[in-house]
């Protein structure tokens, strides 16, 4: 995915919300409840990544051991 998106942080009470477009969520396969991490680059851009849940890592490792 090479398309860039621009979104703006919104404030709701004490919370800060980053509204991501539905098209973006569909393209990257993110769903409600996913944990997203971010990395701020030197030029100010932000890279978002989905954090794999620990049990999925364990399950994938378990499946790699199966014959």
Image (cartoon, grey):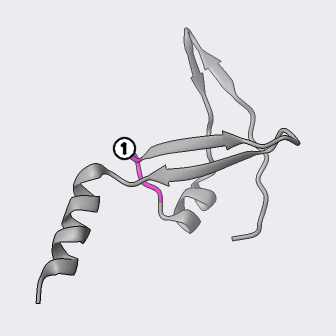
Nearer the observer, 52 or 58: 58
Place of residue 47 in the rendered image (x, y in percent of width and height, measured from the top left): 68, 49
Can residue 32 be found in the magenta stretch? yes
Left or right of 6 on screen, residue 53: left
Residue lying furthest bottom:
67
Q: Is residue 39 above or below residue 60?
A: above
Task: Give residue 29's position: percent from left, percent from top.
Answer: 48, 64
The local secondary structure at tag 1 comes to loop
Q: Is residue 25 left or right of residue 32?
A: right
Rendering quarter of residue 27: bottom right
The quadrant in which the N terminus is found is bottom right
Residue at the image position 11 percent from the left and 90 percent from the top: 67
Confirm whether the magenta stretch covers residue 47. no
Query: Which residue lies most toward the top here?
Result: 14
* Quadrant position of residue 33: top left
Which residue shows up at 16% across the image and 70% down it? 62
**Depth check, front residue: 25 or 60:** 60
Residue for badge 1: 33
Q: Residue at x 47, y 57 (%)?
A: 30
Q: Position of residue 66 (x, y in %)?
A: 12, 83
Q: Residue at x 22, y 79 (%)?
A: 64
61 or 45, which lies in front? 61
Q: Residue furthest left?
A: 67
Segment tinted magenta in the rendering: 30-34
**Residue sticking out furthest to the right:** 43
Please tell me whether the stretch drawn in magenta is mainly helix, strand or loop: loop
């Amino acid at each position: 995915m090479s398309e860039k998106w621009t979104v703006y942080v919104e404030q709701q009470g004490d919370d800060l919300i980053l509204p991501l477009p539905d098209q973006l969520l569909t393209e990257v396969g993110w769903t409600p409840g996913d944990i997203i991490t971010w990395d701020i680059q030197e030029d100010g851009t932000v890279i978002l990544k989905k954090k794999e849940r620990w049990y999925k890592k364990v399950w994938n490792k378990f499946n790699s051991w199966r014959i």
